[in-house]
Image: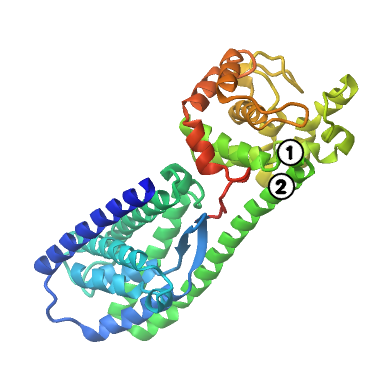
C-alpha cells in the first residue's frame, strides 16, 4: 500500500508540473505558422527511431527500455519552437503497445509527461541560447547550444525514468543507477546521439531531407551496437548468477545463499557510500565468494557435523581456489582479491593469508559480516538458525576482532527485517539485472 500511495503521489506531481509547463509554453511560444511538412517529416523520422526498443535493465516487473530516438528528439529541439518540439517528442515516442492497450494507461500518461518535460525543456534551453535561425546561425553555436539542450534532455529524462522505477520496484535510486551502464557511460552515449541529432538538424536545414535520410543510416548501426552491448551485459550477469546457483544447488540447505550474500553486501556497501564499479565488484564477489567450493567432495560439502582438522585445512583453501579461477578473466580479475580475502579477520586471525585491518579489501570485510549473518540467520546442516537478537549480539561482540567495526555498524543500521522482506524471497533475490 505504501508503494502504491507513494507512486500515485509522485505521478500526480509530475502530471501537474507537466500541465503547468505545457500551458506556459503555449503562452510563451504560441502554435502559429506551423511548418507542417517539416513536422510530418521529423515525426516520421522520430517514430522510426523509437520503433525498435530493447530492455536495458529490469527490476522484477519494472524495466528500463532504450532506443536511438534521442537523436531525432535533439534535432526537433533545435528545429522547432519549445511548444512544438515538446508535442513532437511526446507524440513520436508513442509505441504500438501504447495504442493497442498492452501498456497500462498510467504508464502511457507518465511517459507522455516525461517526454513533454524532457523535450520542452531541452528546446527552451537551446532557443534561449541560440537566437538566430539554424539556417543562418554559426554551426559551432548551433553545436554548443544543441549539446547543452541534449544534456538537459538527458538529465530530465534519466532522472524521471529512474525515480519512477525506484518507487515502483521498491529499490533505492542507488540500486537503479547501479544496474544501468553507469551514469558517465550513459551521458557519453546520449551526448553522442545528441551530436548525431544536431548534425541531422544542420543537414536538414541546409541541404535537405534526402541527405537526412542518408545520414540516418548510422542510427541503425548505433541501435544494433547498443542492443548487443545490453545483451552481452545481461548475459554476463546471468552467467555469473548461474555459477553461483550451481554451487548453491549442491547444498540444498543453503539454497539462495550466494544471491543473498551479494544483495546484502551491495546494500551495506551502498550504505557506506561506495558507488559505481565498487558496488558491481562487491555484488559479483558476493555471488562468487564460494566458487572455490566447486571442487569439494560431497562428503565434505554436505557433512552434517563439524569438519575434522584435516577436512578443515582443505576447506580453508576455497577462498584462494576461487580467486585463482577468476584471475584468467580480465573482467573478473578485480573481483578475485575480494573472494580471496572474504574469510580474513580484522585482527589477523583469519585465513588464508592472515591479513589485518585495512589490508583486507573493503569488499571482503563486508562479505565477511553478511556471510556470518546469513550462516546464523538461516542456519547450516550442522547448526540450526539463531534468533535475530542473538545474532546482533554476536556481531557486536566480534566487532574489532573478527569484523571491521564500521562494517558491522553499517550492517546493523540497516532495517534487517525490511531488507530481508524486500530482497529475499524464498531464499532467492527477486531481481533480473541488466545494463543501460
Where residue 140 appears, x then y in whole percent?
29, 63
| Mark positioned earlier in the residue sequence (1 or 2) | 2
Question: Of residues 219 and 318, which is closer to you in this image?
Answer: 318
227 to 407, vertically: above or below:
below
69 to 129, vertically: above or below:
below
Residue drawn at x 90%, y 22% is 310
Q: Which residue is mark 2?
A: 245
Q: Secondary structure at mark 1?
A: helix
Residue drawn at x 71%, y 47% is 245
Residue drawn at x 61%, y 19% is 403
Numbered label attached to residue 253: 1
Question: Of residues 25 and 70, which is closer to you in this image?
Answer: 25
Of discs 1 and 2, which sits in the foreground?
1
Where residue 82 appears, x then y in whole percent?
20, 67
Residue drawn at x 67%, y 19% is 345
Where residue 273 appears, x then y in whole percent?
46, 32
424 to 122, vertically: above or below:
above
Where residue 307 appears, x then y in whole percent?
85, 24
Residue 81 seen by the camera? no
| Crowd class of label 1 (few under 14; some 14 to 19; many from 20; radius 10 Å) | some
Instruction: State the separation of the CA atoms marked 1 and 2.
Output: 13 Å
Amino acid at each position: 500500500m505504501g508503494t502504491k500511495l507513494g507512486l500515485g503521489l509522485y505521478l500526480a506531481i509530475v502530471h501537474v508540473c507537466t500541465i503547468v509547463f505545457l500551458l506556459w509554453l503555449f503562452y510563451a511560444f504560441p502554435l502559429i505558422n506551423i511548418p507542417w511538412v517539416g513536422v510530418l517529416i521529423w515525426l516520421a523520422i522520430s517514430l522510426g527511431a523509437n520503433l525498435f526498443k530493447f530492455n536495458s535493465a529490469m527490476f522484477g516487473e519494472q524495466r528500463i527500455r532504450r532506443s536511438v530516438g534521442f537523436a531525432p528528439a535533439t534535432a526537433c529541439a533545435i528545429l522547432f519552437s519549445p511548444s512544438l518540439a515538446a508535442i513532437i517528442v511526446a507524440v513520436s515516442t508513442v509505441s504500438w503497445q501504447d495504442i493497442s492497450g498492452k501498456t497500462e494507461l498510467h504508464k502511457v500518461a507518465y511517459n507522455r509527461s516525461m517526454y513533454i518535460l524532457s523535450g520542452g525543456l531541452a528546446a527552451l534551453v537551446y532557443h534561449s541560447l541560440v537566437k538566430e535561425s539554424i539556417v543562418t546561425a554559426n554551426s559551432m553555436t548551433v553545436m554548443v547550444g544543441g549539446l547543452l539542450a541534449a544534456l538537459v534532455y538527458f538529465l530530465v529524462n534519466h532522472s524521471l525514468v529512474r525515480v519512477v522505477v525506484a518507487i515502483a520496484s521498491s529499490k533505492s535510486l542507488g540500486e537503479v543507477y547501479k544496474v544501468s551502464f553507469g551514469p558517465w557511460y550513459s551521458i557519453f552515449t546520449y551526448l553522442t546521439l545528441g551530436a548525431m541529432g544536431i548534425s541531422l538538424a544542420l543537414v536538414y536545414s541546409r541541404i535537405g531531407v534526402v541527405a537526412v535520410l542518408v545520414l540516418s543510416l548510422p542510427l541503425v548501426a548505433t541501435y544494433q551496437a547498443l542492443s548487443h552491448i545490453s545483451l552481452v551485459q545481461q548475459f554476463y550477469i546471468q552467467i555469473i548468477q548461474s555459477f553461483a546457483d550451481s554451487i548453491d544447488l549442491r547444498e540444498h540447505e543453503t539454497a539462495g545463499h550466494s544471491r543473498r550474500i551479494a544483495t546484502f553486501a551491495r546494500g551495506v556497501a551502498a550504505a557506506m557510500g561506495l558507488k559505481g564499479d565498487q558496488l558491481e565488484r562487491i555484488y559479483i564477489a558476493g555471488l562468487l565468494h564460494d566458487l572455490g567450493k566447486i571442487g569439494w567432495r560431497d562428503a565434505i560439502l554436505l557433512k552434517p557435523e563439524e569438519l575434522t582438522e584435516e577436512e578443515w585445512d582443505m576447506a580453508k583453501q576455497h577462498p584462494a581456489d576461487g580467486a585463482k579461477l577468476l584471475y584468467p578473466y580480465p573482467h573478473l580479475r578485480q573481483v578475485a582479491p575480494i573472494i580471496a580475502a572474504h574469510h580474513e579477520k580484522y585482527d589477523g586471525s583469519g585465513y588464508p593469508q592472515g591479513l589485518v585491518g585495512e589490508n583486507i579489501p573493503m569488499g571482503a570485510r563486508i562479505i565477511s559480516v553478511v556471510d556470518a549473518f546469513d550462516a546464523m540467520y538461516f542456519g547450516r546442516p550442522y547448526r540450526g538458525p539463531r534468533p535475530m537478537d542473538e545474532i546482533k549480539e554476536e556481531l557486536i561482540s566480534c566487532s574489532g576482532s573478527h569484523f571491521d567495526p564500521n562494517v558491522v555498524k553499517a550492517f546493523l543500521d540497516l532495517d534487517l527485517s525490511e531488507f530481508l522482506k524486500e530482497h529475499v524471497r524464498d531464499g532467492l533475490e527477486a531481481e533480473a539485472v541488466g545494463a543501460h
